[in-house]
Image: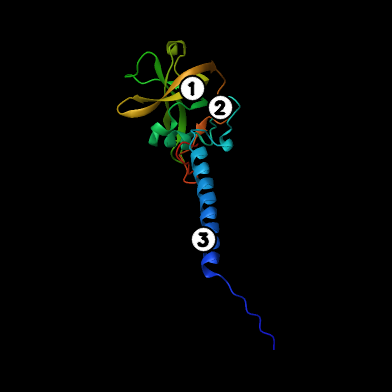
Amino acid sequence: MFIFNVKVNGSKLFKVFFTFIIILMIIILCTVFYKVISGSNKSFSVSDNLDSSGVCKISAKNYTNILKTVHENIDNYVGMKIKFTGYVYRVSDLNENQFVLARDMIISSDSQFLVVGFLSEYEKAKDFSDDTWVTVVGEIQKGNYHGDIPILKIIDISKCEKPSEEYVYPPDESYIPTSGIL
């Protein structure tokens, strides 16, 4: 019978193991911290068609989800630029330079709809009559209209044809945005 006796210095082995665990934890913490910081830089996700100029193109499919998210978390989206198509809609208590860039949201199976959209401001808003379809690029700002709401400061606007997807649908529960990311 052969017996092999190894003397292990327990304090030295513990120090090496403990140092290894500390270094591993620091690496993991730095990685998580980097991902959190880089994920909250107020940019939209690639799935929302972010173009090279940093403008998010909103489609009929994600329109109400984004509208709801921005209204619920205004401060997280101030300064972001978006592009979308809607029609000019005015209510009596808006200023001359304001209109709602609207879409009709279907709310029932018998085609009842509700007008939804971003309150928009543009110096030459009077040049666009009600029900005119336009495509806009604008920057989200925080404003006041019967409370805090996002206001779209229009940077570029052009008339367009009514889109094939004229109607939008209520927000769905599958869209779960993170703070500052659409």
Distance, label 2 to label 1, CA atoms, is 12 Å
Q: Position of residue 159 (x, y in %)?
A: 54, 16
Q: Residues within 10 Å of mark 2 (few under 14, many from 20)?
A: few
Residue 143: give x, y in percent of width and height: 35, 24
Which residue corresponds to mark 1? 138
**Label 1 crowd bin: few (<14), some (14–19), many (20+), radius 10 Å:** many
**Badge 2 is on which residue?**
54
User: Which kind of residue does numbered mark 3 sit on?
Assistant: Phe
In the rendered structure, the answer to whether residue 95 lies left or right of residue 125 reads left
Residue 97 at x, y = what percent?
39, 14
The numbered mark, 2 or 3, whose residue comes first in the sequence reads: 3
Q: Nearer the viewer, mark 2 or mark 3?
A: 3
Question: How far is mark 2 from mark 3, CA to CA?
Answer: 46 Å
Note whether 4 is above or below 38 in the view shown.
Answer: below
Taking 104 as reference, is 163 left or right?
A: right
Q: Which residue is mark 3?
A: 18
Residue drawn at x 32%, y 25% as measured from the top left: 145
Q: Residue at 52% across / 33% down in the picture?
A: 43
Quick one: SS at disc 2? Answer: loop
Q: Please state which of the two labelled residues, at mark 2 or mark 1, is closer to the viewer.
A: 2
